[in-house]
């Protein structure tokens, strides 16, 4: 357990991606089975301990210290696991041997909800603060150490001198603690043969169009298609097994039975998951959110928010792997395939005709549908390559919308920002000119620099008018207030917000010290944008 705690500590303190890769590869080489396999499962989200919940951990620690003192400690530290690991009373016998990671995983896997408090308390008593932190992160599943599942797989590839795409294609046929996988990576056994059907194919991603990128490209070499505002998915049907994956390889089939039950044949499709009927209408992302992150879906939800897949690419057909073929050939085969699928659930993402970059830029800025985010550029002769290779694919998103809003509320952040007011609620004016009132339209906690954070934090402290628990209400009136230029990707109607509007991906673009609060935008500007 101490080796696992040590790697978590070092990963937290190592910001560089290559540094994290080296740490992980060294850990996988030096730690024996099964501990390294369980560590890999923890890093890739493959462990689940339903008997351990944050509320139970809070109850455990407040049995051992004053509840108010714990609340102050948690507010200052900003992380539940770190707070509990630091304030937990030291054991009477500090020489007790720490359990191995495999032992801890097996214990947590078997424990019942009624026995979990006693089991967790016993484990915490046997561990030092660093290992306590690792235990709580392991048990609750929220590592938050800057390591994605793909980064962990890339470390495995580096360790064994393999291609990460090979590991990703095997992944869903493997189970923790992955002993067969490590044996192959270390050359002690052959490549594991996955008997599972409907395997995930690593997705190909695009680079954002940067300054000067288009000048180096010939428009004749590229095809363009709309970039839809849904979620990227992969639908696979093999041997009667139907599966739907997110772009990171998480299986989400159970949440979308209406799509899966219509999929047939031997194929793998890449596309965008959207709400609606492709023959009639395409719903907004807020409609899609009603279906996301659900384990079960009611009949009413299926009827109110039906989903379909707007297809971008064909990865497999029958026994043939289409990925090595050029995009233009894959696209032609996809066009031939789509009429054989249910037209209510699958359609083809249309290409965008253009002669030069100026014409495409005009179309990008004026898309035919409100949920189009921009355009994708795909080189016609490019194979479908895993990861994000530079050159074959580009994404050219439309410019964000902006609004000048007034800061209304602020709340302190967590972790490194626990001492700063870094989470902001902002609003725009509503009502007649002689009775203007601010209505909240969004929240944001990023987009500003560290120096700007310090300036906003000082403004919040100097202009607080009320406190509501951890939230400060900031002076905001036509004659006095801090104006923030807020960038966002789009708007949706919302019944949960007083303004009736919900922003997509709001962030602070800049501080408008030069602009009086009275000149911030009116709600009519946002409703006009929404209606458009």
Image (cartoon, rainbow, N blue to C red):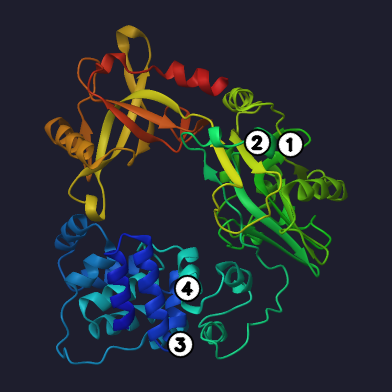
Q: Alpha-carbon distance for marks 2 and 1?
A: 7 Å
Above or below, comparing residue 397 to residue 88 in the picture: above
Most foreground residue, 39 or 124: 39
Q: Earlier in the sequence, mark 3 or mark 1?
A: 3
- Left or right: 411, with 249 as reference point: left
Mark toward the viewer: 2 or 3: 2
Q: Tell me the residue that label 3 is attached to.
A: 34
- Circle 1 — which element? loop
* C-alpha gap between disc 2 and disc 4: 36 Å
> Badge 4, how many Cα within 10 Å: few under 14, some, many 20+?
some
Q: Which mark is residue 158?
A: 4
Which label number is shown at residue 350?
Answer: 1
- N-terminal-most mark, 2 or 4: 4
- Estimate the x, y position of residue 211 in percent, counting from the top left: 46, 34
* Residue at x 68%, y 54% (from the top left corner): 383
- Residue at x 58% of width, y 72% of height: 167
> Which label lies toward us, 3 or 4?
4
The residue under label 2 is 226
Q: Earlier in the sequence, mark 2 or mark 3?
A: 3
Residue 197, given in percent of the width and then of the height, sits at: 73, 72
For the residues labelled 3 and 4, the Cα–Cα distance comes to: 20 Å
Element on which disc 2 rests: strand
Q: Secondary structure at mark 4?
A: helix
How many numbered marks appear? 4
Q: CA distance from mark 2 to mark 3?
A: 46 Å
Q: Is residue 339 left or right of residue 383?
A: right
- Earlier in the chain: of badge 2 and badge 1, it is 2
Horizontal side of 275 relative to 33 (left or right) equals right
Q: Answer with the quarter of the image where residue 56 lies.
A: bottom left
Would you identify the image quadrant in which residue 397 lies?
top right
Looking at the image, do the residues carrying marks 3 and 1 touch, with CB atoms under 8 Å apart? no
Task: Work out how far the residue at label 1 is from the one at label 4, CA to CA, in angstroms.
Answer: 39 Å
């Amino acid at each position: 357990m101490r080796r696992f705690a040590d790697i978590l500590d070092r990963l937290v303190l190592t910001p560089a991606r290559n540094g994290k890769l080296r740490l992980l590869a060294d850990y996988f080489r030096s730690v024996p089975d099964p501990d390294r396999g369980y560590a890999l499962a923890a890093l890739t989200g493959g462990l689940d301990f339903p008997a351990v919940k944050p509320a139970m951990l809070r109850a455990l620690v407040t049995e051992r210290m004053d509840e108010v003192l714990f609340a102050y400690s948690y507010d200052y530290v900003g992380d539940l696991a770190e707070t509990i690991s630091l304030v937990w009373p030291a054991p009477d016998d500090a020489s007790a041997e720490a359990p191995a990671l495999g032992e801890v995983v097996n214990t947590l896997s078997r424990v019942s909800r009624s026995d979990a408090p006693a089991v967790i308390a016993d484990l915490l008593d046997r561990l030092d603060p660093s290992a306590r932190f690792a235990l709580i992160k392991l048990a609750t599943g929220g590592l938050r150490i800057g390591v994605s599942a793909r980064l962990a797989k890339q470390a495995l590839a580096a360790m064994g001198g393999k291609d990460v795409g090979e590991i990703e294609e095997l992944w869903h046929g493997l189970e923790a603690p992955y002993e067969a996988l490590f044996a192959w990576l270390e050359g002690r056994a052959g490549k594991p043969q996955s008997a599972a059907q409907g395997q995930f194919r690593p997705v190909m991603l695009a680079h954002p169009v940067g300054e000067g990128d288009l000048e180096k490209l010939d428009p004749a070499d590229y095809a363009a298609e709309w970039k839809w505002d849904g979620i990227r998915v992969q639908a696979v049907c093999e041997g009667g097994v139907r599966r739907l994956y997110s772009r990171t390889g998480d299986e989400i089939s159970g949440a979308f039975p209406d799509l899966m039950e219509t999929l047939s044949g031997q194929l793998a499709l890449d596309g965008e998951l959207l709400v609606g009927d492709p023959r009639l209408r395409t719903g907004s992302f807020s409609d899609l959110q009603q279906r996301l992150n659900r384990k079960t879906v009611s009949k009413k939800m299926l009827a109110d928010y039906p989903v379909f897949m707007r297809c971008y690419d064909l990865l497999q057909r029958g026994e043939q792997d289409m990925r090595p073929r050029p995009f233009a050939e894959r696209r032609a085969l996809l066009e031939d395939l789509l009429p054989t699928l249910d037209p209510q659930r699958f359609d083809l993402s249309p290409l965008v005709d253009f002669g030069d970059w100026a014409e495409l830029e005009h179309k990008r800025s004026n898309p035919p549908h409100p949920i189009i985010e921009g355009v994708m550029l795909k080189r016609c002769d490019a194979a479908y390559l895993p990861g994000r290779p530079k050159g074959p694919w580009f994404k050219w998103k439309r410019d964000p919308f902006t609004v000048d809003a007034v800061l209304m509320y602020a709340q302190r952040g967590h972790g490194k920002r626990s001492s700063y007011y870094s989470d902001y609620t902002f609003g725009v004016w509503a009502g007649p000119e002689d009775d203007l009132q601010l209505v909240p339209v969004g929240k944001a906690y990023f987009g500003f620099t560290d120096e700007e954070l310090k300036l906003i934090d000082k403004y919040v402290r100097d202009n607080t008018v009320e406190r509501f628990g951890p939230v400060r209400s900031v002076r905001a009136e036509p004659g006095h207030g801090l104006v923030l230029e807020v960038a966002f990707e789009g708007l949706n109607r919302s019944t949960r917000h007083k303004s009736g509007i919900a922003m997509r991906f709001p962030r602070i673009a800049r501080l408008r010290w030069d602009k009086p609060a009275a000149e911030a935008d009116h709600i009519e500007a946002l409703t006009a944008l929404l209606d458009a």
